[in-house]
Image (spheres, grey):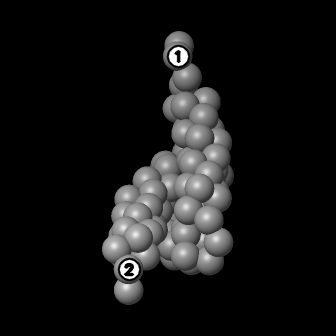
């Protein structure tokens, strides 16, 4: 394996681990705030669903051809979820 290929794999691993973690965390926060149930139930449900989000993020990162596409595929939903959390939690006011 060439050095370039090793770096490409290492970059995908880092993106999958850290980007997937961030996306799963934002999904957990958004779902916990948005689910129409009690606070404890919403948090538990959101946390359980976050494992599926994390797994999907890892699969996405290694499933697409280009690293930039993988990064965009994690960044855009993360921005959307971050905006949703900001809006649901009270925004700037």
Q: Which label belongs to residue 92? A: 1
Q: Secondary structure at mark 2?
A: loop
Q: Nearer the viewer, residue 62 or 30?
A: 62
Q: Nearer the viewer, residue 46 or 77?
A: 77
- Residue 22 coordinates in the image, percent (x, y): 43, 53
Q: Which label belongs to residue 2? A: 2
Q: Residues within 10 Å of mark 2 (few under 14, many from 20)?
A: few
* Observer able to see residue 43: no
Q: Nearer the viewer, residue 64 or 75?
A: 64
Res. 60 image quadrant: bottom right
Q: Is 38 situated above or below 58?
A: above
Query: Which residue lies most toward the front here?
Result: 2
For the N terminus, the image quarter is: bottom left
Residue in the picture at 57% in, 48% down: 75
Residue in the picture at 62% in, 65% down: 66
- The CA span between labels 2 and 1 is 49 Å
- Residue 35 coordinates in the image, percent (x, y): 62, 53
Q: Is 93 situated above or below 61?
A: above
Q: Nearer the viewer, residue 54 or 76?
A: 76
Res. 25 image quadrant: bottom left
Residue in the picture at 45% in, 57% down: 19
- Residue 73 coordinates in the image, percent (x, y): 63, 57
């Amino acid at each position: 394996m060439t050095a370039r290929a090793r770096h490409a794999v290492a970059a995908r691993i880092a993106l999958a681990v850290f980007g997937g973690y961030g996306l799963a965390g934002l999904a957990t926060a958004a779902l916990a705030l948005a689910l129409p149930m009690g606070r404890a139930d919403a948090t538990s449900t959101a946390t359980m669903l976050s494992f599926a989000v994390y797994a999907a993020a890892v699969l996405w990162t290694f499933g697409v051809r280009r690293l930039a596409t993988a990064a965009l595929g994690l960044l855009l939903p993360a921005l959307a979820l971050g905006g949703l959390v900001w809006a649901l939690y009270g925004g700037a006011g």
